[in-house]
Structures are given as structure tokens and as C-alpha cells.
Image (cartoon, rainbow, N blue to C red):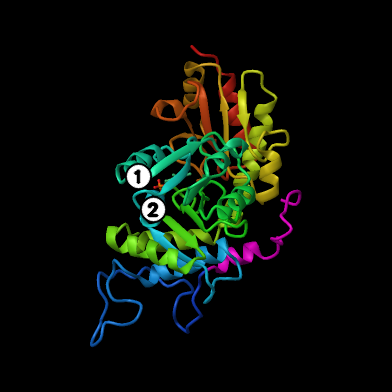
Amino acid sequence: MTEHQHPEHPPHGEGTRAVRAGLPEPVKHEPTLPGPVFAAHFHLPGDPTGPYTYGRDENPTWTHLERAIGELEAPGQDSGGPVETLVFASGMAAISAVLFSQLRAGDVAVLPDDGYQALPLVREQLTAYGIEVRTAPTGGDAQLELLDGASLLWIETPSNPGLDVCDIRRLVAAAHERGAKVAVDNTLATPLGQRPLALGADFSVASGTKGLTGHGDLLLGYVTGADAEAMADVRRWRKIVGAIPGPMEAWLAHRSLATLQLRIDRQNANALAVAEALRARTDVTGLRYPGLGGDPSHAVAARQMRRFGSVVSFTLPSRERAERFLAELHLVEEATSFGGVRSTAERRGRWGGDAVPEGFIRFSAGAEDPEDLIADVLRALDVPVA
Ligand SMILES: *Cc1c(COP(=O)(O)O)cnc(C)c1O
């Protein structure tokens, strides 16, 4: 990643930051990363003060992880600064926490119409609570047209699974001008790919289930924000709903962050290599990868992203060809989700819900050797439909 580094974010020290993020001061005879604290309640004699009282409100294992994510999302503002991070049981728990804690009946929210597949369900629920929801596509900054009277703009960039990109700075400026807050779903990029707060957003929200933790063995979500009052509302929502991560998941997630840069760099390089290999094929259409020169998203992505993600999308001529391709892959598991160290792919249309062609494939590049991965993909593409 030398080509498209953003001038505001010098590249130095990211790997160092990842391996050390959130670690407490060393204590003799204690491990570097303390183990998970399993506690429903904490010793609490006398007045119920201090950070750790009851396990739904706080947990020391969360605290370490929250500091770590905060250091990655907003470097330099982690200790005592205004930026706060809260972890949740899943990405959807984090998304719901922002939307349902920030919006009131009569408010207007602007959402993408091509974002994560659970957003239409969220939209239904918001509408049922008397919140007006407007939607527009991510590409072309189309949400810009809907901001009059809005109090919250929700951005997902790159969008999932279409991989369109919108201009975060431009949308933030327009939203703030109208008094609307802005939240960015940072799941696909991870904080090493994009830092929404530095681009002006009020919240960076993500599923930690995907590339952030990268092993496909836990669900997690988080919200990072700089507005103390807004974050207090998000925290209150977590307490009310109780959508909290278990200490074991939080600890595993923190452990996984140490390899974040290594994983993301390899996976993103593999994604680019897969995209370049697919570009040469006549049986592949609709190829999208924001890191690919010539991709419709590339120019905007290069201005605001530092790494372009591990997901590539493309379309094969038919459902049969797509199913055969997936069945023939040896190194790529057919599974949903993305961002893991083992490559996965799926025919997205099997879920319904996303507006994609029958042969549409969402491909998530893992950390395999690029030669092995490319060879597997090209071989599987060449197997004819029986
Ligand atoms: C997976 C995903 C979510 C939801 O995260 P969970 O951890 O599955 O709840 C939200 N947004 C995006 C972009 C995702 O890919």
C-alpha cells in the first residue's frame, strides 16, 4: 500500500499499533493480554461506585478491547480523549444501538438501499416507531439528495455486496450543514482500510465478525464515536437491550487484533490478485473491486481508503455456472460472511433480498498463498457445467 496513502494518515506504526492496541500497563507475573474475566457481578461493598459493578454494564475484558478498537479507529485519541468505543454482541446490535438510541418518532433517517441485507428489516422497525426512512443507492453519492430535514445519515461504504463507494467527506459536509449526524458502517474496510471519524463522521460502526477478527469464530460489533452525549445514549441503549458480548468472545477478538495488519494486507493483496485474474476472463462480467484501477469506485475509494478490502464481486453467466464454480473450488469454502483468513465465496442470490443477478458471486479473499488461490479459482472456472 504505497500508492494511495491518505496524507492525513501517515502509514507509520500501524502494525506496531495493531499488536499493542489496548494492552494494559505491564504488571510483573501477569500476562501481556489478561485473560477473559468471567463475572456476572463484581465485589461491590458500600456505595456502588467504580467502573465494574454488574456484568451487563461493564467488564474489564471489554475495556481492553474497546481501547484497542478505539486506538485503531482514531489513533492518538485513545487515552482520556473524547473518542469512546463500545462493544456489542454483534454488528447488528451495534447498528441498532446507534439508530434506535439516536432517532425519535418524527425524525428522518437516510439509509442506503444497497447496504447490508438486514437493513430493510431495520427500516421496517424504524418506520413502525414513527421514524421516516428515506433510501438511495451508495454510488454517485445519491443519498445527498435526501438530506433536507434529516437528523441521521447512515452510510455503508464500500457497500455490501455491490462494492459501490460514496464520498464520505462530501456527504458528511452536506449532512452537518443540515444538522444531521453521520454514521458509517466500517465493516468491510476495517479501521486499517478507512477511518470514518477522521473523514468527519460522528460514528464508525462495524461488525467485528468479519475482517476485524478474521477467523470466523465469533460475532461482535462496536460503535466508536467522538460525541460524548451521543455515546452516552448508545451506552444507555446497550444497558437497556443487553446486547453485550461474552468475555470469551471479547478476549478472542482482542487476541485477533494483533494480526490485523498482517491478515488485512495479505487478504487485500489476494483480493486484488483475484480481481486482476478475473478481469482477463470473458465469462466474468460485472467485476467489482474498489482497489482495481478502472473500477467505478476506484477514484473515490483511493481518496478516502488506505486499503480496499478483501471482497471481490462478479457475475458468471448463469446460476448453474455459478453453482458449478463454487462446487469445484478446493481452497475456497462456500459460506456466507467475509473477511476471514480462509477464502469463502457464495452465490449471493440464494438468499433473496439483494438485487443481484442469479450468477452473482461474492468472493472473500483469505490469507492463502496467492498462486494457490488464483490457480484454484481459474481451475474451478474452467470446469464445464455437466
Ligand atoms: C455482517 C455485516 C453486518 C452485521 O454484522 P453481524 O455481526 O452479523 O451482526 C453489518 N454490516 C455489514 C456491512 C456486514 O457485512
Label 2 sits on a secondary structure element that is loop
Give the image location of residue 19, x and y in percent.
57, 65
Name the amino acid type tagged 2: Leu
Which residue lies at the image location 42% right of the left edge and 73% below the top edge?
34
Disc 2 marks which residue? 103
Q: Which mark is residue 182?
A: none
Q: Nearer the viewer, residue 352 or 334?
A: 352
Task: Determine the residue located farthest toward the top in the rendered image.
Answer: 386
Quarter of image, res 62: bottom left
In the drawing, does residue 106 fall left or right of residue 25?
left
Residue 298, by quadrant, is top right
Circle 1 sits on which residue?
126
Position of 242 with respect to 223 (left or right) is left
Residue 253, placed above or below residue 59: above
Residue at 61% over, 25% down: 286
Q: Nearer the viewer, residue 33 or 74?
A: 74
Question: Between residues 84 and 22, which one lies in front from this camera angle?
Answer: 84
Regarding residue 371, the answer to whether it shows in the image is: yes
Q: Is residue 7 magenta?
A: yes
User: Where residue 322 sits: x, y (%)?
Assistant: 50, 22
Occupied quadrant, residue 177? bottom right
The answer to whether residue 254 is above or below residue 208 is below
Residue 120 appears at what percent x and percent y? 39, 37
The span shown in magenta is: 1-21
Badge 2: how crowded within 10 Å, few (<14), some, or many (20+)? Answer: some
Amino acid type of the residue tagged 1 in the rendering: Leu
In terms of depth relative to the viewer, which is nearer, 332 or 70? 70
Magenta stretch: dominant SS? Answer: loop
Q: Residue at x 56, y 44 (%)?
A: 157
Residue at (30% x, 64% y) in the render: 239
